Amino acid sequence: MGWDVDVAGVSRVLQDTATHGDDLVCAWQGSDGGTQGVVQVAQLVVTYSQSALIGKALQEFFEVREKTVSVMAERLQGSLTGVGEAVKAIVFGDETMAAQIGQQMDAAAGSGNFLGLAGLG
């Protein structure tokens, strides 16, 4: 089976997606450049509200959401790495490797564990 892969196009999509993933994490956690993220702003709200009820509600909300954002970042990184490595394998004519990476990505999607894919690159 022959493939016609626009490597530059795929690379551009992967890079754009990675940038948006970084933006998501930065919006959540803040940045090294001093930008406050959602977590820091919520901590300020708790401090200035002087309400135990608001503080507890926000704490519980962010504990749940932090796990969600971490899982999203893990999946994004693993998926981008997997797709990039599969495209490289196709470009170099290694369809067996591309198929194996595809199977690993399917397994990761089924299990929810994308950590192994992040180590492909």
Image (tube, rainbow, N blue to C red):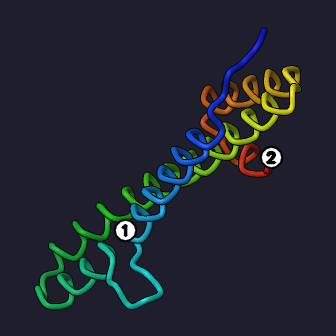
Q: Residue at the spot x=66%, y=38% of the render? A: 7
Q: Residue at the spot x=43%, y=89% of the render? A: 33
> How far from the left and from the top, in percent, is residue 50?
13, 88
The nearer-to-camera label among 2 and 1 is 2
Query: Gap in Å between the C-alphas at discs 2 and 1?
Result: 27 Å
Q: Secondary structure at mark 2?
A: loop
Instruction: Indicate the amino acid at tag 2.
Output: Leu
Front one among 54 and 114 = 114
Give the vertical position of 83 relative to 56 (above or below).
above
Front one among 27 and 99 = 99
Residue 94 picture quarter: top right
Q: Earlier in the sequence, mark 2 or mark 1?
A: 1
Residue 120, label in figure: 2
Q: Which residue is mark 1?
A: 28
Q: Is residue 95 left or right of residue 87?
A: right
> How far from the left and from the top, in percent, is residue 20?
42, 56
> How far from the left and from the top, in percent, is residue 17?
48, 49
Q: Quadrant of the N terminus?
A: top right
